[in-house]
Amino acid sequence: MMKSSLLASIADKTYTIGILGLGYVGLPLMWTFHKKGYKVIGYDVDPAKIDCLENGIPYIKHLGSDMMQVLSQSDRCQATTDFSRLPEADALIMCVPTPLNAYREPDMSYVEQTTVTISKHLRKGQLVVLESTTYPGTTDELMIPILEKNSGLKAGVDFYVAYSPEREDPGNANFNTELIPKVVGADGPDALEIALAMYNAAIVKTVPVRDCKTAEAVKITENVFRSVNIALVNELKVVFDAMGIDVHEVLDAAATKPFGFMKFTPGPGLGGHCIPIDPFYLTWKAREFGLNTKFIELAGEINTAMPEYVIRKTMEALNTRRKSINGSKILMVGLAYKPNVDDMRESPTFVLMEKAEALGAEVEYYDTYIPVIPPTREHAAYTGKKSVIWSETAIRGYDAVIIATDHKNVDYAALAAWADLIVDTRNAYPGAADGRVFKA
Ligand SMILES: NC(=O)c1ccc[n+]([C@@H]2O[C@H](COP(=O)([O-])OP(=O)(O)OC[C@H]3O[C@@H](n4cnc5c(N)ncnc54)[C@H](O)[C@@H]3O)[C@@H](O)[C@H]2O)c1
């Protein structure tokens, strides 16, 4: 009875979608359901985000300002820090952070706190979905017991639980939340049916799997796959460079094989909230089973060694000018961890800056996506540092320019004309080997 009325309300769009955590994942998800005609309520502990949503002020650059305007003016969209309003939503979709702690172990505090909050307000018929990336077992072993204990309700009978990983690729012009097939695992057949009906109403395709832990494993597998393959091309970059071979030319040519090869691109190290972090959720969980994740560890080792390699290449490049890195003025182009977004979480540019400074260099950065560095946990020393003004005089004043992220809005032709020495970690200058551009 309850299930059929829930399915009916999804079908006739009287079903209300609640999103907890309105960041890079939660905000576009809220937008997607809103676009399809659903009432959406966003919950976040950060009052600044709620304020932005109420006033139509964009806080994630690549999502643009139109979306924020529409959401702020719609009577089908509300945003609040008041979690006592959780019962107003039929579905509660959690998109909260899952970082690593200081010991590189899963920091489940956000998921746990949010689950506790939900459990205090949980009502019959609600669907609770976790979208945060996590280790297999989180939904069943961590969330359901908290939800049941604090609410006195029974999962699969009184309320429903599912796990559906977010595969959002911020800044990707070809795919947004709506267009990326959604894997869904649930706690029992009723929960699965309801979760699938909800996502099918907003997303191009759903991919049901047998349970929550399988869905959790899918997401981790995707990110381990990326981490390992990025490590592989990073290793090949170092080896081929020593042999006088351009790794980018090799990869471009290899990518013409119509089967059995997938192109990954080397870079200055791993960045972002996902690839450097998520694989270690599996490493941690595998230990419970007495197992090691050797590929994950090795990939992590190779990828984290990349900034060191870039600095060594920079020292060699400066050496050709009879300069030492100590006392050199270095400009980092690109602070975001990948092109055309304002996300600087885990960005290797920070590591490059720290390493260059530790060797005595004077370092500045240029990134119009991040005009001022906001407070970060790991790189507090850079809080308030500003992107330099782009000008010929400024560029000519640097001993070396390191291209750490290849944003499209950088004038690379001008940079090539003005800079004395460029260390290119992103192949911004394909094929260049003119004594001024050094590949790293
Ligand atoms: N960013 C991506 O590209 C991406 C892609 C796929 C999956 N993921 C995963 O999705 C999850 C969220 O990532 P994100 O990038 O959106 O993070 P984010 O930091 O951009 O957003 C998280 C939001 O959750 C809020 N929050 C924290 N604690 C809360 C609580 N107790 N209740 C309500 N809100 C709370 C924060 O204020 C913030 O607004 C992570 O598990 C991440 O690994 C991220």
Image (cartoon, rainbow, N blue to C red):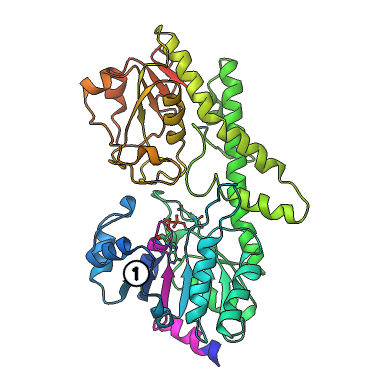
* Quadrant hosting residue 436: top left
Q: Position of residue 360 (x, y in %)?
A: 41, 20
**Which contiguous range is marked in magenta?**
5-27
Is any part of residue 36 visible from this angle?
no
User: Which element type, helix, strand or loop, lies under badge 1?
Assistant: helix
**Which residue is tagged 1?**
35
* Quadrant hosting residue 1: bottom right
Q: Position of residue 327 (x, y in %)?
A: 37, 16
Q: Residue furthest bottom?
A: 1
Question: Is residue 170 depicted above or below 414 in this figure?
Answer: below
Q: How many residues crowd around disc 1 within 10 Å: few (fewer than 14), some, or many (20 or more)?
A: some
Q: Position of residue 244 (x, y in %)?
A: 56, 15
Viewer-proximal residue among 373 and 136 = 373
Question: Is residue 302 depicted above or below 21 in this figure?
Answer: above
The structure residue drawn at horizontal position 34% and vertical position 41%, both measured from the top left corner, is 383
The structure residue drawn at horizontal position 66% and vertical position 40%, both measured from the top left corner, is 297
Q: Position of residue 82 (x, y in %)?
A: 36, 74
